Image (spheres, coloured by chain):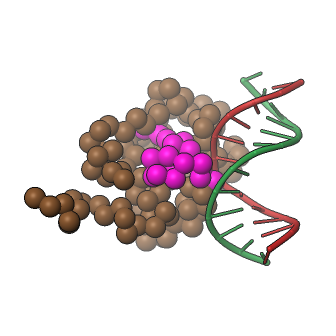
Chain colours: A brown, B red, C green
Amino acid sequence: MTKQESTGTDSRKLTPAERIWHTVGFIPKGSVASYGKIADLAGLPGRARYVGYCLRNVPASLTLPWHRVLRSNGQIAFPAGTPQALTQCELLADEQVLVQNNRVNLKLYGWEPGLDVLLHQLAF
DNA sequence: CAAGTGACTTTCG
DNA sequence: CCGAAAGCCACTT
């Protein structure tokens, strides 16, 4: 059958910002990903800063797991002690993600998307 | 259109 | 391991 109508998500119509939001939304509970990884999975390599920009501009109507996005070294993007960092730490703790000194062990919690996700949600 | 800014990343010391 | 500097990209002024 001709694949004129795409199954599920039609990435072609989505703006880069929407792709980023969708990608972040696919991070499973209990896992985390870096800004660069999100940009890469969203099909926007080298735009890690743009991911941060989009998360800051995310509509209030969207409930996005922004707390699962960390820096490349596993550190929280906000300085320790700030309300944002504390909130993110709490949200991660609720998902059984261990946070020590404003930092997360990416080796343990780093998200590695399976083929199902790559082919169904992030298929470019 | 040039300069400044930022929820980033990598390299160097 | 940690801090500083440079590189990078999209947006704002």
Seen from the viewer's position, the closer of residues A9 and A80 is A9
* Residue A26 locus on image (x, y percent): 37, 50
* Image spot of residue A62 (x, y percent): 43, 66
Q: Residue furthest front?
A: A2
Image side of residue B5 versus residue A14, left or right: right
Q: Count the marks.
A: 0
| A47 lies above or below B10 | below
Name the residue at 69% across, 43% down. Answer: A80
Residue A25 can be seen, yes or no: no
Question: What residue appears at the point 60 percent right and 48 percent down from the top-left corner?
Answer: A46
Rendering quarter of residue A101: top right
Name the image quarter holding the N terminus of chain A: bottom left
Residue A79 shows up from this direction: yes
- Decide: is A101 above or below A41: above
Q: Is residue A33 magenta?
A: yes
**Residue A91 within the magenta-colored segment of the rendering:** no
User: What residue do we see at 20% from left, 66% from top?
Assistant: A5
Q: Can you give x and y, in whole percent of width and height, for residue A55 in the image?
A: 55, 60
Residue C4 is situated, as x and y percent measured from the top left of the image, at 88, 39
Decide if residue A11 is on the left or right side of residue A35. left
Vertical order, C3 against C7 (above or below): above
Q: Residue furthest left?
A: A1
Instruction: Give the magenta part as a residue range.
Output: A31-49
Residue displayed at 54% across by 48% down: A45
**Corner quadrant of residue A117:** top left
